[in-house]
Amino acid sequence: MRFQTPLVPATLIRRYKRFLADARLDDGREITAHVANPGAMTGMKEIGTRIWLEPNDDPKRKLKYTWRLAEVGGAFIGVDTSVPNRMLRAALERGVPGLEGYATVRPEVRYGENSRIDFLLEGGGVPAWVEVKSVTLSRTHGLAEFPDTVTARGAKHLAELAIRAEAGERAVMLYLVQRTDCTAVSLAADIDPAYARAWAQATARGVETLAFGCDITPKSVSLGAPLPFHPCD
């Protein structure tokens, strides 16, 4: 997925009110950008972080910049939580390792209790229900971790996937690492032990786990290689 407008570099001044960030462009101008990420953004929102913004000239939009990437230690980290699903849909339609052979890819299908699955794959035998989690936390060199904060919603999704698995369908938790400096994925059980327990219970009930990296540049984001998943690290 290519960004619609070339990204411009800036320096983060502060992130606040969850969806706003002040930044200084390289020409010295200070601007306010939209932050398409309601999460904790641990390790990527410190003052002085090098960030990448997408400008827009839409008269209907109040803010003229959106924060797309952070650059930490020479690695790019995806900030926008909507990017993974947009990019992944195109990848699934071409065929993703472990999820090949499906004729249709349906996003945002209702299931469970007031939930929507990210993707339902059909037309290739047993339907596959695929939940996607964007992973941006890394506290150990080369290791990405999920979650970066307590997520009762994430545990709920695992329980709902387990119901589909027990019904004889495929249920897949897909962790998508939105950073370029990690080669493996784990669960941050110290941050959210309830989520780690929910993952173990869902796995025992038949839920599959897949993990992939992302190839990220200031020009585009695309699906990277499969990554090993180590739940007990």
Image: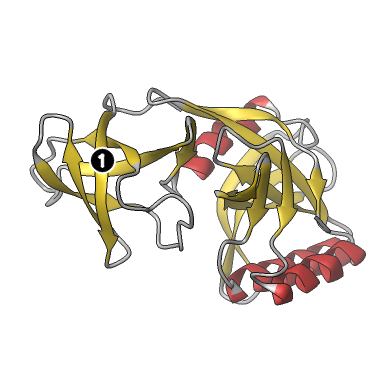
Question: Measured from the top left, where is residue 74 in percent x and y?
Answer: 47, 30
Instruction: Report if residue 186 is visible in the image.
Output: yes
Image point 55% across, 41% down: which residue? 178
Question: Measured from the top left, where is residue 29 in percent x and y?
Answer: 8, 38
Tell me: 113 left or right of 194.
left
Tell me which amino acid carries mark 1: Thr
Image point 11% across, 48% down: which residue? 60
Question: Measured from the top left, where is residue 216 in percent x and y?
Answer: 50, 28
* Badge 1 density bin: few <14, some 14–19, many ≥20, Cα 10 Å: many
62, 230: nearer the viewer: 230
143, 55: nearer the viewer: 143
Q: Secondary structure at mark 1?
A: strand
Question: Measured from the top left, where is residue 10 in percent x and y?
Answer: 24, 36
Tell me: 185 left or right of 8.
right
Image point 15% across, 49% down: which residue? 63
Q: Which residue is mark 1?
A: 11
143, 171: nearer the viewer: 143
Tell me: 200 left or right of 151.
right
The quadrant of the image that shows the C terminus is bottom right
- How many numbered circles does the render carry? 1
Tell me: 89 left or right of 156.
left
On the image, which quarter does residue 91 sit in?
Answer: top right
On the image, which quarter does residue 16 sit in?
Answer: bottom left
On the image, which quarter does residue 69 sit in?
Answer: top left
Which scheme is used to colour this image of the protein?
A: secondary structure
Image point 40% across, 62% down: which residue? 38
Instruction: Report if residue 167 is visible in the image.
Output: no
